[in-house]
Image (spheres, grey):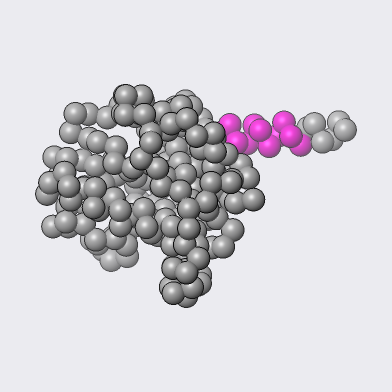
Amino acid sequence: MKQLLIAVCLFASALFAYAQQETIELPAPTKTGGKPLLEALNERQSLKDFTGKEFDNQTLSNLLWATYGFNRPDKRTVPSSQNRQEIDVYVMFKDGVYFYDAKENKLKLHVKGDFRDGLGSQAYVNDAAINLVFVANLDKASNREAAFIDTGYISQNVYLFCASEGNLGTVARGSFSRTKLPPALKLTDKQEVTLVQAVGYVK
């Protein structure tokens, strides 16, 4: 019993330390393998029953690269209107929110704290390994409508990655709090949350 308690305490301490890092260096993403495209499309679905298990850094790197990484020196895994690349991806853990720097392949701490109450009332967001927050920089976008269309491409990449992995699930959500989330993320009047997406291991 004592050994089990010590192990639990060490695990909890590790998670706390992980969430408090100023920068999370990600390993190079794996860009090969996975299920064939048509099989992944056939298995794509919205799933909400998460285990609460955390992601390791390799899975996180692979997911974020598929979501919005660079597959050419100046182009991403998704299209964007006039190549403005106006969307930023924030990764929300239970103890902090990180900005995904795709060029450097790292996560940079944006704000410390638990801001999941800004994601809405669905309890399953607390069981997801992460919640992705897509933010449009309207001063970069060709127009506001294009920013929402571009968000859709990004969100679909998350779905296809999860389907390809087989043990991951995701659900895109527009029912976040538009009064709580933007100030929690310290967004400017030129930034707008377009969508949030829970991602995690499924039961």
Query: Residue 115: horizontal and vertical position, in percent?
Result: 44, 27
Q: Residue furthest right?
A: 1
Left/right of residue 109 with respect to residue 199 in the rendered view: left
Towards the viewer: 70 or 150: 150
Query: Residue 65: horizontal and vertical position, in percent?
Result: 40, 57
Towards the viewer: 104 or 159: 159
Q: Is 16 part of what is drawn in magenta?
A: yes
Residue appearing at x 13%, y 40% in the figure: 139
Residue appearing at x 47%, y 44% in the figure: 198
Q: Is residue 187 visible?
A: yes
Query: Residue 17: horizontal and vertical position, in percent?
Result: 57, 33
Location of residue 153 with respect to 106 vertically, above or below: below
Dominant secondary-structure state across the stretch colored magenta: helix
Q: Is 161 part of what is drawn in magenta?
A: no
Residue appearing at x 45%, y 41% in the figure: 131
The quarter of the displayed image where residue 74 is located: bottom left
Residue appearing at x 13%, y 57% in the figure: 82
Location of residue 115 with respect to 85 vertically, above or below: above
In the image, the segment drawn in magenta is: 7-20
Towards the viewer: 102 or 152: 152
Left/right of residue 36 with respect to residue 188 in the rendered view: right
Query: Residue 156: horizontal and vertical position, in percent?
Result: 37, 57
Q: In the rendered picture of this protein, how many numbered marks are placed on residues?
A: 0
Location of residue 177 with respect to 18 vertically, above or below: above
Q: Is residue 133 visible?
A: no
Q: Quadrant of the N terminus?
A: top right
The quarter of the displayed image where residue 140 is located: top left
